Image: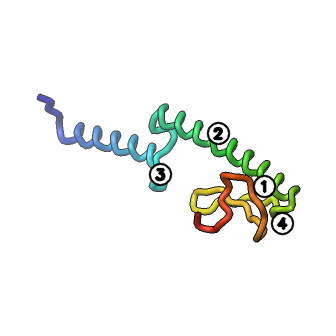
């Protein structure tokens, strides 16, 4: 059984609260919360950068082939999007309709 004075318990609670507060900033969990979380977020960021580069390359290729008016890539609701001209022939696997 753990017994402590009220002052010691309050101090422990305050330290614990401050430590937790340092890991949560503006409603988000900090990368410093754990090494595993920091590693996952770093891998996710690297994957997003690689995907962005791939999409930039695809957009540039579509522009060169005349299927697009711009090499602009946007992020819409978590998806990378490239504007395509109406009636453009697209390679298999590329969606040609909004909302697909």
Residue at image point 73% right, 58% down: 73
Q: Which residue is mark 3?
A: 28
Which one is earlier in the sequence, the residue at label 3 or at label 1? 3
Q: Is residue 2 above or below residue 17?
A: above
Which one is earlier in the sequence, the residue at label 2 or at label 3? 3
Which one is earlier in the sequence, the residue at label 3 or at label 4? 3
Q: Do tag 3 and tag 1 residues touch (Cβ < 8 Å)?
A: no
Q: Is residue 38 above or below residue 97?
A: above
Which one is earlier in the sequence, the residue at label 1 or at label 4? 1
Cα–Cα span, label 3 and label 1:
33 Å
Which one is earlier in the sequence, the residue at label 1 or at label 2? 2
Instruction: Indicate which label's residue lies in the foreground, 3 or 1.
Output: 1
Image coordinates of residue 95 in percent, x first then y, are: 65, 59
Q: Which residue is mark 4?
A: 69
User: Callout 3: few (<14), some (14-19), or many (20+) C-alpha neighbours within 10 Å?
Assistant: few
Residue at image point 61% right, 57% down: 79
Instruction: Indicate which label's residue lies in the foreground, 3 or 4.
Output: 4
Q: Which residue is mark 1?
A: 59
Which one is earlier in the sequence, the residue at label 2 or at label 4? 2
Image coordinates of residue 96 in percent, x first then y, are: 68, 63
């Amino acid at each position: 059984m753990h017994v402590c004075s009220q002052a010691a318990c309050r101090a422990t609670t305050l330290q614990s609260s401050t430590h937790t507060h340092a890991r949560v900033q503006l409603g988000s969990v900090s990368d410093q919360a754990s090494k595993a979380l920091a590693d996952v977020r770093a891998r996710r960021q690297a994957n997003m950068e690689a995907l962005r580069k791939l999409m930039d390359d695809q957009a540039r290729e579509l522009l060169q082939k005349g299927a697009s008016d711009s090499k602009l890539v946007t992020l819409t609701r978590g998806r990378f999007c490239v504007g395509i001209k109406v009636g453009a022939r697209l390679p298999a696997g590329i969606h040609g309709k909004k909302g697909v």
